[in-house]
Image (cartoon, grey):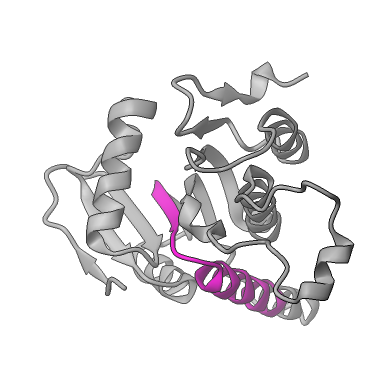
Amino acid sequence: MIQKFTCVPKSDYDVVIISNGTEAQISAKVSQINNHLSNNEIPVNSRVTYLSNFKSLIAHLHTHTADQRFKGKVVFMFFNGLEFVQDIIGDVIDHYSRFMHMSYQKKKLIEEKLENVYFYFDSSISEESVKPADPYDILLYKQFQSYDYHFNTLATIANDIIKKMDFMLGRIRGVYIDDLNLQGDRTVPIQQIHRNYPKVERIDLSSYSMSMRNDMIF
């Protein structure tokens, strides 16, 4: 897992990447997003700070942003199983609970707001077989049910992450899902994310050259 470090900037734009991926994984996927999906959406020639958890992001905002409305780009990138997803959700819930507690006590609040947010969900998150672990569990499954990795798993994770973080999100500029090795319908899960969260401006899939924008949902 990467540790916090900041690249030497070539411009004054701030980019913060929060991820459990390796430097090589992050670099490869950011390059893929920029080159094939969104035309240099994440400017890596800027001041880029890499963080490994949500708590470090909050500390970074308090240190570098006077009004806590961070106007740079914040990119959450999820790889390799569910542990990092669970860690992020747990930290977000704890942060929200502290915020609400201070609000109830009418204490001075520091409300962090992320104005330009991106999410990347790698297929390695869901690469755990759904095949029954116990022979008797097979009775719970329909005949001929596929044990492949399902797109809906990643879409559900994306939906849950956005739901938990909604209180501190401004614009969600893009949601990127690596779906090349995933099975199942794409349209309905994507429409549900757009309908539930109008802040999501676009969703890109690695299997498609076109993105689905919010104004395309009806």
Q: How many marks?
A: 0
User: Would residue 38 be visible to someone looking at this image?
Assistant: no
Expressed as whole percent of the image width and height from the top left, the position of residue 57 reads: 43, 68
Q: Nearer the viewer, residue 44 or 65?
A: 44
The vertical placement of 58 against 29, above or below, is below
- 29 sits to left or right of 209: left
Locate residue 92: give its quadrant.
Answer: bottom right
Residue at coordinates 22% horizontally, 68% vertically from top-left? 5
Quarter placement of the C terminus:
top right
Viewer-proximal residue among 23 and 183? 183
Image coords of residue 21 (percent x, y): 35, 63
Position of residue 27 in the picture relative to residue 147 (left or right): left
Boundaries of the magenta span:
71-98
The residue sitting at 53% across, 74% down in the picture is 83
Q: Quadrant of residue 161?
A: bottom right
x 27%, y 74%: residue? 3
Please provide percent x and percent y for residue 12. Answer: 20, 45
Vertical placement of residue 40 versus 124, above or below: above
Nearest the viewer among 184 and 131 is 131
